[in-house]
């Protein structure tokens, strides 16, 4: 892991609904809700701030409704953040990218990020082959050489331990574990410096989970990519993350080195999480 | 029904020059100017109904009607042939409402309206080609929604189109698309060239002449200005190829290197090949232009 | 080849036109008069006016005669004619609340202010083929008319109002239906003057529906009624009758001039409840359908589709604006359908070439 900051997130928030002056005061972990009692708006995510270094793995842990998925979806531009800043080192002059036009965001995303979703239906197109799913990322990055596309797709599928013949098979005919591997291959297609993983093993059998997690760890070491790993499972966080954010009701309640958080949790909620982990 | 029967009698009604009124012509021309300024971009226009059915060339007709003047020389072809029944019908309507001179020799025409072909003799800078378009949206291949295809064009988000070409090669060994092959215009928009055969696409690229494309039912016009690049979508390692007429020649004029129709004799049932461009074929037979001796391209 | 083919083409077209005319006239019967069509084929004339987008029973009847009864062909003739006409002025909004009622029913309530007026409808006719119509003479016709008119009580019924209050307005008073939005100063879309782009505003959608082909909108509305995007519809009100058409007075400010009246069918569908954004309580939702002439199947279908196209979570074809509006114009659809009869031999040659190439590569 280098010292160079890859990604800086400041005061990032996502709200659904009209919003009012009381939203911030009436929502968050102290109130145990992210719904504003006055206007009914949902503060899905509020006041998120962190830096991510090159090659670092950041864990984001919390229960459903904590805002952890919202966070990565906003970083990946699947959702539009309501307020705050996201900046990438060496891109757009190091300035906030949230105001860029959609076409620019798409190009930035294609170059800099990969995303793996909990549900493969969100990350893959089921109506095209596995190879085509990977090819789509390459084509978005203006790689128009068929043999090269084929080679890179085959290489990535091999690296994610998918049998070679599956390149022309449709994802819906393959197992959940295979579909996650295709997502990982697709996420890595353009050698992005950042990969986001949103509950990637939550839907899988325990044995399959372990293998996919091992794969993720190996790839990260080999390629030195930064990752943001979202999970409700402290075990996954412990395995992968260098540092961790703990989220509740849309806010970060605690953050720090994963080891420290596990050994000496400060916030009551973190203590609950740590002690209830098997 | 004839045009005369269509128009109400004895009410002093007279149709305008070229049938449509000046207001409509102005609107079409405005749309065409915008189209020329944005090569390959589809510009909406309110195409009014004509006495010709939708899907039968009303868009191309409205473009021609908006441009044509008394001194123009008009050629109309369908599948390359002046004698095709629909070309004859459209020519009747235009001549009846303008009185302009017509020609079968593409070199003489100032305005050339065509369904699905370009003439074999490339057009010059003083000539305009008007192409009839049934389905202007090339992305319809991968996306049925107009709202979504508009977004894809505006964001230059063509990945899904390319993915369908990738899948096509994986399945069939090569790109199976035939007529109306999608092209990148001016390195920008992806456009449908109208259902031209692949054969004609090199004629659109960096042409001397202006090409205007009209879709009446879908209410869009678009354009390829002169000397604009028109590149059929292809993978870097699988160059675009045209139809293969290698070793074949026209049974009437002897040319090879033209697009050839496959025909079956009415009496004997025997197969033979003749030039699709009937005007070109006639001129070769008359000795007015030399027979084409080898493949012009592809 | 060029000249011969052109001559051949012209001759073929002319012969085809002669043959068409001959087929229409060759029988023993006397030529149909336009009046006969106008008077005795009202629903067909109404349908053609509606789909042709031009209110003129005479021209619609003439088009029907020319098209030998083909409704889509007749609508096409009427639309093409309409394109040649000069637009003079826009009328003032038509006040359907003041419609002179021929028929007015509501399925929502058993009795309604003003009463249910069954009027003229084929709904309760027994569909038994009436062979006596084959021998209907002028005498029979005159006797039937005389008998009916003699039985009329021409004094106005004191219990019947001049105008019938809208059922939907009653529901609105009880806040069961959303209030009428404030009048907008914006010009309504005119689909005959601008090309429709999607998403299309409601004014544009209603216009496209108004001249859509009856069979097309019926099929899509039927799909919703059967469950593909159901809206749980009730006919709040169906009214058929005549409304005045007025234009602003040319020089007297604020005054209006009545040009005449047109026959319209109007349906208001009351559909499944929804709680609107920012509202506390749910209300019914509405669907509106209106077309020229007396065409109830079309108006009901339009009312259903107006509502399905506003579904908050569109999934079914009837809920997809583009699907509904782009595929229900009879003139465009039939034109494109027919265009497949045009020569496609060059495009087909291109297909032949590709198929042979791919097969050649395999063999």
Image: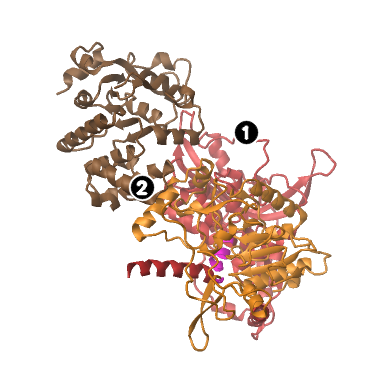
- The percent position of residue A49, horizontal first and vertical second, equals 38, 17
Give neighbour class at mark 1: few <14, some 14-19, many 20+ (Cα, 10 Å). Answer: few
- Output the chain of dot 1: C
In this orientation, does residue A163 appear? Answer: yes
- The percent position of residue C44, horizontal first and vertical second, equals 61, 66
Q: Which mark is residue A218?
A: none
Give neighbour class at mark 2: few <14, some 14-19, many 20+ (Cα, 10 Å). Answer: many
Relative placement, left or right, of C236 versus A233 is right
Task: Determine the residue positioned at 77% across, 55% down.
Answer: B22
- The mark tally for this picture is 2
Task: Determine the residue positioned at 65% across, 77% down.
Answer: B282
Do the residues at discs 1 and 2 belong to one chain?
A: no
Q: Mark 1 points at which residue?
A: C182
Task: Determine the residue positioned at 71% across, 51% down.
Answer: B29
The residue lying toward the viewer, choosing from B112 and C333, is B112
Instruction: Work out how far the residue at label 1 is from the one at label 2, CA to CA, in angstroms.
Output: 57 Å
Q: Give the range drawn in magenta.
A: C332-343
For the colour orange, the matching chain is B
| Model colouring | by chain
Q: In which quarter of the image is the C terminus of chain A?
A: top left
Q: Residue B207: which quarter of the image? A: bottom right
Chain C: its colour in the image is red
For the colour brown, the matching chain is A
- Output the chain of dot 2: A
Q: Mark 2 points at which residue?
A: A149
């Amino acid at each position: 892991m280098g010292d160079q900051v890859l990604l800086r997130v400041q005061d990032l928030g996502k709200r659904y609904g009209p919003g009012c002056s009381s939203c911030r005061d009436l929502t968050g972990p102290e109130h145990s809700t992210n719904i504003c009692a006055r206007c009914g708006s949902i503060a899905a995510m509020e006041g998120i701030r962190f830096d991510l270094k090159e090659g670092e793995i950041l864990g984001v842990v919390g229960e459903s409704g904590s805002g952890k998925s919202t966070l990565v979806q906003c970083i990946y531009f699947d959702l539009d953040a309501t307020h705050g800043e996201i900046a990438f080192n060496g891109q757009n002059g190091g300035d906030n990218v949230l105001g860029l036009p959609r076409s620019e965001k798409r190009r930035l995303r294609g170059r800099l990020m990969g995303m793996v979703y909990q549900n493969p239906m969100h990350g893959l197109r089921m109506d095209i082959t596995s190879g085509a799913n990977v090819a789509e990322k390459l084509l978005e990055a203006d790689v128009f050489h068929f043999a090269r596309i084929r080679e890179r797709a085959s290489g990535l599928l091999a690296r994610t331990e998918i049998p070679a013949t599956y390149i022309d098979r449709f994802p819906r005919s393959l197992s959940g574990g295979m579909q996650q591997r295709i997502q990982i291959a697709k996420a890595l297609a353009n050698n992005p410096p950042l990969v986001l993983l949103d509950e990637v093993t939550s839907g899988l059998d325990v044995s399959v989970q372990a293998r996919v997690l091992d794969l993720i760890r190996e790839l990260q070491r080999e390629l030195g990519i930064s990752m943001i790993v979202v999970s409700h499972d402290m075990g996954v966080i412990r395995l992968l993350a260098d540092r961790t954010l703990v989220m509740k009701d849309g806010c970060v309640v605690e953050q720090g080195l994963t080891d420290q958080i596990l050994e000496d949790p400060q916030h009551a909620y973190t203590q609950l999480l740590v002690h209830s982990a098997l | 029904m004839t045009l005369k029967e269509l128009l109400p009698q004895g009410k002093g009604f007279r149709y305008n020059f070229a049938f449509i009124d000046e207001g409509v012509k102005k609107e079409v021309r405005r749309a065409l100017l915008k189209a020329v300024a944005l090569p390959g971009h589809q510009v909406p226009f309110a195409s009014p109904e004509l006495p010709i059915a939708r899907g039968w060339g009303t868009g191309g007709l409205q473009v021609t009607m908006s441009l044509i003047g008394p001194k123009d020389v008009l050629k109309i072809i369908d599948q390359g042939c002046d004698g095709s029944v629909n070309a004859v019908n459209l020519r009747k309507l235009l001549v009846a409402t303008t009185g302009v001179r017509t020609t079968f020799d593409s070199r003489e025409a100032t305005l050339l309206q065509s369904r699905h072909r370009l003439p074999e003799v490339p057009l010059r800078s003083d000539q305009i080609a008007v192409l009839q378009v049934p389905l202007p949206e090339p992305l319809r291949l991968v996306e049925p929604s107009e709202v979504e295809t508009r977004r894809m064009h505006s964001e230059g988000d063509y990945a899904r189109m390319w993915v369908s070409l990738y899948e096509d090669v994986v399945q069939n060994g090569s790109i199976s698309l035939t007529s109306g092959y999608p092209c990148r215009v001016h390195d920008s928009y992806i456009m449908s060239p109208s259902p031209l055969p692949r054969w004609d696409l090199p004629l659109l690229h960096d042409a001397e002449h202006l090409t205007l494309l009209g879709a009446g039912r879908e209410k869009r016009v678009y354009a390829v200005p002169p000397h604009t690049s028109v590149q059929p979508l292809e993978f870097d390692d699988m160059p675009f190829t045209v139809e293969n007429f290698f070793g074949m020649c026209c049974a009437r004029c002897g040319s090879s290197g033209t697009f050839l129709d496959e025909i079956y004799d009415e009496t004997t049932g025997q197969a033979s090949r003749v030039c699709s461009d009937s005007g070109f074929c006639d001129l070769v037979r008359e000795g007015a232009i030399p027979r084409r001796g080898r493949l012009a391209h592809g | 080849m060029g000249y011969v083919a052109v001559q051949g083409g012209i001759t073929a077209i002319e012969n085809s036109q002669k043959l068409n005319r001959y087929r229409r006239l060759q029988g023993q019967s006397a030529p149909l008069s336009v009046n006969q069509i106008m008077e005795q084929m009202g629903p067909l004339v109404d349908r053609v006016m509606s789909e042709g987008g031009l209110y003129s029973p005479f021209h619609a009847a003439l088009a029907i005669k020319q098209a030998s009864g083909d409704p889509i062909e007749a609508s096409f003739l009427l639309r093409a004619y309409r394109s040649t006409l000069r637009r003079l002025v826009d009328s003032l909004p038509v006040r359907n609340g003041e419609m002179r009622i021929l028929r007015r029913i509501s399925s929502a309530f058993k009795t309604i202010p003003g009463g249910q007026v069954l009027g003229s409808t084929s709904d309760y006719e027994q569909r038994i083929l009436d062979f006596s119509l084959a021998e209907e003479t002028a005498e029979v016709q005159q006797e039937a008319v005389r008998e009916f008119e003699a039985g009329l009580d021409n004094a106005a019924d004191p219990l019947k109002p001049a105008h019938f209050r809208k059922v939907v307005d009653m529901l609105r008073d009880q806040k069961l239906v959303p209030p009428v939005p404030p009048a907008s100063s914006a010009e309504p879309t005119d689909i005959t003057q601008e090309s429709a782009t999607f998403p299309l505003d409601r004014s544009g959608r209603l216009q496209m529906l108004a001249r859509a082909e009856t069979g097309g909108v019926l099929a899509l509305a039927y799909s919703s009624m059967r469950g593909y995007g159901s809206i749980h519809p009730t006919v709040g009100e169906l009214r058929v009758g005549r409304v005045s058409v007025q234009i602003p007075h040319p020089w007297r400010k604020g005054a209006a001039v009545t040009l005449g009246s047109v026959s319209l069918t109007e349906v208001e569908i009351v559909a499944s409840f929804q709680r609107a954004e920012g509202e506390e309580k749910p209300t019914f939702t509405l669907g509106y359908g209106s077309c020229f002439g007396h065409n109830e199947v079309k108006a009901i279908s339009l009312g259903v589709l107006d509502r399905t196209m506003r579904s908050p979570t569109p999934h079914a074809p009837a809920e997809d604006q583009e699907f509904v509006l782009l595929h229900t114009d009879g003139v465009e659809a039939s034109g494109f359908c027919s265009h497949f009869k045009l020569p496609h031999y060059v495009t087909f040659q291109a297909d032949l070439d590709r198929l042979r190439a791919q097969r050649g590569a395999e063999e």
